[in-house]
Amino acid sequence: MPVPTAVPEPHATRRLALDCRSLLDHRQAGGVCGCCCGAFRPRYKRLVDNIFPEDPEDGLVKANMEKLTFYALSAPEKLDRIGAYLSERLSRDVARHRYGYVCIAMEALDQLLMACHCQSINLFVESFLKMVRKLLESDKPNLQILGTNSFVKFANIEEDTPSYHRSYDFFVSRFSEMCHSSFEDPDVRTKIRMAGIKGLQGVVRKTVNDELQANIWDPQHMDKIVPSLLFNLQSGEGTESRSPSPLQASEKEKESPAELTERCFRELLGRAAYGNIKNAVTPVLMHLDNHCLWEGKSFAVRCFKIIMYSIQSQHSHLVIQQLLGHLDANSKTSATVRAGIVEVLLEAAAIAASGSVGPTVLEVFNTLLRQLKLSVDYALTGSYDCTTMGTRTIKEHEERQLQEAVIKTIGSFANTLPTYQRSEVMLFIMGKIPIPGMHLMPPPSGSGSETDRMIQVMLLKSLRQVTSGFQSTNMLTALPSSFLDPLLSFALLEDAHIRLLVLEILVSLIDRHDNLPKFSTISIIPDISVLKLKMEKCSRQDNLFMKKHAQQLYRHIYLSCKEQSSVQPHFEMLYSLLALISMELANEEVVVDLIRLALALQDLALASEETLRVYNRCAVHALSAAYLNLICQLTTVPTFCQHVHEVIEMRQKKSPFLLPEDVFIENPKIPEILEKPEAEILFQQAKITEVLGGSGYNTERLTTPYIPQFTDEDRLSKRKSVGETISLQVEVESRNSPEKEERTPAEEITFEALKNAIVDSVGMEEQERERRRQVVEKFQKAPFEEIAAHCGARATMLQSKLSQIFEITIRPPPSPSGTITAGYGQTQSRSVPVYEMKFPDLCVY
């Protein structure tokens, strides 16, 4: 009988297969098990196994790798299985610390990725990312760097088909964590951080242009990526930003984490679209807040330089608007923080292209002016309420630095604007300045007047920054009445600093050929040709401007010289203003008026009724002499120049303290008491009139002394009360009222009457001033009921006069019978046919 064959049990068969598989996995090259059992394994596994050498130090078996690559290209449906098997081997080798085989597996994966571009690569990528993730999760720095390098190679591959389910959240978090590595060994720490930066760069490249991927611009990702980059950028703060545009880095630069970070940050920002700018910039602002980096300024400025140079130029205004919003949000933080934000704004405005402020130009300046006013309030009160830290005491010098930074930033923004927009900004700032008031009265005990004064000073400084370098071909548009009138009203304030700012603004606007530096000091210039002045013929628009505003300018120059508080800078600015008007806006009539004004200033210094100090009198004499020396050479009238030079030479011999060289110095050489000068050291009006008339100038105006008129504008600046403003209206009414005309008898015009009128003109002017003073005093001191009764009487009189006029002009239609006598003895008109009416000759055509 045959011997029965034992049938193996099912579980025994399974155990045998597993043992064979284990032997195959751990076989030695050329071993017996490999030769016997290798044929039972799938081909892709055999090809994968063959790329691993016996000694991992020998590296990848290139011949077998070529076979595996050819197989993968020939049978792309096997890619997912190849990837899964490689992933399985790599996980096992990592767990068993066989890092040589791990490197070989990753090299094989990289080569397969680079060679295979097909529709099945998505499944292979999943296995690849799984292996990269396994390496990144390891605590071994070498494995983390190995996984990062493989991911970077993968990120540079452009896939043919999109992936709907792939997620990079883990990689963003892990690479960000590597950027903050605190490994003990500095060299290893640097390598890990650089690997993290490269990994973030790879994530951005892989996802930023793929709409089907997770949006890398979401705040949840940007809040990790941007702070990680800034952390490494800060570590290399000593190196300056190199270039305004992203450049290809050399191999040497890749060794520095800061340089690599900057390149990655530039690339990230360069890819940002319009809607992503906010998400990219907000983490920068938060990082600077959290780490108190505004106060240092240098790092914050460097960050935003990179931002402004890297983003598209048409998006620059979005960054500026975010900075302005952040400044508002930090309005109650320390002055150093706000100053840091303003400093960054200044740099951003300088980098941005023209017009980058965006559509809300005035809103930008409104925000800066609001911060300026808040800073003034904080400086005067000494503290402010902080929601997180309670009441906080501020330092005045820090607020002052902030104010200067804001003013400088306002000027920087204005320089990026075209001319028409800058004019709008000038009007906008002028509208924000508090109207001067209570000029002749002492300031109240409270801080309100001091607040207004400080705000006036700060806004005028801002206006000076805006007008700096402003050049307009048309002075009517550069200095419209809506701007010039309120500006000149500030020139009459008692505050010397405010008056000086107004003069600086006027000089800056009038100087269109950069002649101002040549008149920075007052001096007697023997030959002005050495100054090489730039002059052009006065245009028609400039002539119209002077016809409209010349008297305003002359009056304010004259009144500024009368101010007791005027010092050397004021007279230097007045000299510059006179000189620039002579070169920029002067025609023949203006030249005569300016000479007349200069002679009036000399008379002002001589007037005994004026309570001017000795220094001010000498300064006005010196100003008049310096200007007449300039204008006589500009007119090129030899006899005029001769007279001016003779007077100056006599002053140099007898009274040098009436010339600028002895007055406008650090220690003025002036006498304690100023005696009345002799005629030979004074400029003679009759002589100047004669020589100018002989040269063809119309000198009729020179024969009449210049006397400034008191205008509404002066009242606006120096009014005492509301009653003074009302008095102006009543005064005008009283001068033009019909009653006054009726009471004035007709006077016969004779030679004697004309002679008396000329002789008594000075007395009449005094009487007129006294009458005005009485009217003003009446409305200041009279009770309200009396003023109301007076106004009511005026209204009744006006109504009666209107009724009389209406009775004369509006009559009932005449009757056809002509003039008839009605009842009660009244006469009525009778209508006359048109053809019988008699019209004046001038009315007949």
Image (spheres, grey):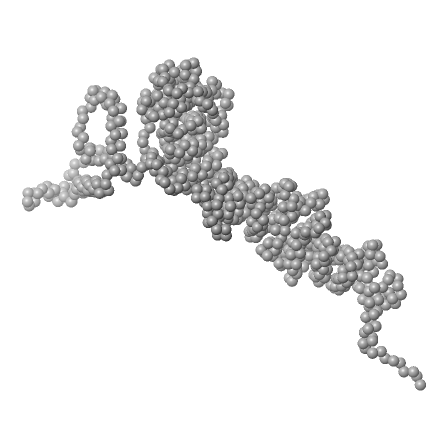
Q: Position of residue 597 (x, y in %)?
A: 37, 24
Residue 198 in view, yes or no: no
Q: Nearer the viewer, residue 830 or 3?
A: 3
Q: Residue at x 57, y 42 (%)?
A: 297
Q: From the viewer's perspective, tell me whether residue 268 is left or right of residue 5.
A: left
| Residue drawn at point x = 81 percent, y = 66 percent | 42
Number of on-image labels: 0
Tell me the quarter of the picture where residue 102 sits: bottom right
Whether residue 432 is visible: yes
- Residue 199 location (% of width, % of height): 68, 53
Residue 609, image quadrant: top left
Q: Residue at x 73, y 55 (%)?
A: 140
Vertical position of residue 321 compared to residue 123: above or below: above
Q: Eyeballing the image, is 334 above or below 533?
A: below
In the picture, the quarter occupied by the N terminus is bottom right
The residue depicted at 23 percent of the width and 35 percent of the height is 734
Q: Is residue 174 left or right of residue 502?
A: right
Q: Please, is residue 230 above or below residue 772 in the view?
A: below
The percent coordinates of residue 46 (x first, y second) are 82, 63
Q: Quadrant of the C terminus?
A: top left
Tell me where residue 476 appears, x and y as whole percent: 41, 34
Q: Quadrant of residue 299?
A: top right
- Farthest residue, direction left: 824
Nearer to me, 588 or 463: 463
The residue nearer to you, when weighing 326 against 127, is: 326
